[in-house]
Amino acid sequence: MTSALFPTFARADLAFERGEGLRLYTTDGEEYLDFASGIAVNSLGHSHPHLIEALTEQAGRLWHVSNLYEIPEQARLGERLAAATFADVCFFTNSGAEAVETAIKTARRYHYAKGKPERYRLITFEGAFHGRTLATIAAGGKDKYLEGFGPAVDGFDQVPFADVEAARAAITDETAGILIEPVQGEGGIRVVPNAVMRALRALCDEHGLLMVLDEVQCGVGRTGKLFAHEWAGIEPDIMAIAKGIGGGFPFGACLATSEAACGMVAGVHGTTFGGNPLAMQVGNAVLDVILADGFLDHVRDAGLRFRQGLARIVDTYPGVVDEIRGEGLMLGVRCVVPNGDLIAALRDQQVLSVGAGDNVVRLVPPLTIEMADIDLSLERIEAACAAVAAKEGGS
């Protein structure tokens, strides 16, 4: 039977009908441990009761009115995000790509408002992934995403990963800012060293540039801090977030200081669905959980336990995996064998994972994962590595 869907996804032959916490259940009744989390989206796992209650209650009252009117839930979420971060103001979107687009426009518009419209270019980094729109694929700079879509959107100058001196050398009179993921997700769970983040912040200050962060994947508690840049002790001017803030409900946000957002006045940007009451109620519910006392401590503790267990597996199977990367519960194992081999072996062990660049397998479970399930997953990951090793040895 021919599918009525665009053939743009190489889908696994799995379909799920329900989930609970870390676990997903197929239409055939099989149970899987979800270390993919919808690509780092299901921050509180599946069917979290607080999220269900918030969404159900709001769905019974009001779904959509548009931003022509005040949306109390939106105002509340904006205030809470501002109180918990560097930001003064927020703009809500439908996705991470739109949040990054808003961040790019905000950076450009800032310099326009300051009388320097020629400053529109952003310095980006090799291995980055910022989304699938025409502007964000240009920012990411990967040929495989750019091919076939016409001339790349102008305004992005890419330098090697985490190379401060290359970033310095790329600054011109047209440079508006620096756009970077504190931890590259699609790029292979590559953590930008704290010293580099601090040096880039200083570089922005020195040259009057805006520091623009893409924390779509690494933000909202994923690394054990509310946002990953906090590990470096710096603050950006603009930041895009999504994925975990919705806990599975699709929305994102662009956060900024009032100064950085000074050019974003009435009429210059907009959205029909962004910030609708359903999304905002869910976002507030996610923050209820993640900002609760002890939650981020749990993420850090769970991440340490998981990392230590993975390190033992690397020592045992050096012919399969050779490096552990990441922070908190945003971890990756770099493979010696093709990463697809390990992903398939993990699936055979009822563990779901996600591929990434640099031959890495991402392991991004719900932040609510229990220690017993970490131990169970490590048993299955080790069994998967053993299966791959046996197959390699017999080939």
Image: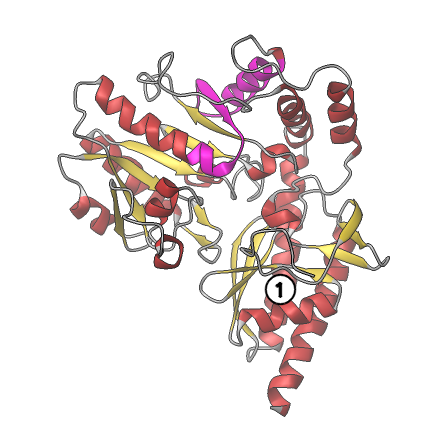
Residue placed farthest to the bottom in the image?
394
Q: Is residue 309 left or right of residue 273?
A: right
310 or 219, nearer to the observer: 219
Magenta segment's dominant SS is helix
Q: Which residues are magenta?
A: 73-100
Vertical side of 64 occupied by 394: above or below: below
Residue 107 picture quarter: top left
Residue at 66% across, 42% down? 42
Residue at 29% across, 39% down? 178
Vertical side of 12 occupied by 210: above or below: above
310 or 143, nearer to the observer: 143
Residue placed farthest to the right in the image?
29
Q: Which residue is mark 1?
A: 310
**Res 355 seen here:** yes
Q: Is residue 47 left or right of residue 266?
A: right
Secondary structure of the residue carrying tag 1 is helix
Residue placed farthest to the top in the image?
69
Residue at 35% across, 20% down? 261
Estimate the x, y position of residue 8 in percent, counting from the top left.
53, 55
Is 122 magenta? The answer is no
Estimate the x, y position of residue 382 in percent, counting from the top left.
69, 71
Vertical side of 101 occupied by 68: above or below: above
Which amino acid, by three-letter code, is at mark 1? Leu
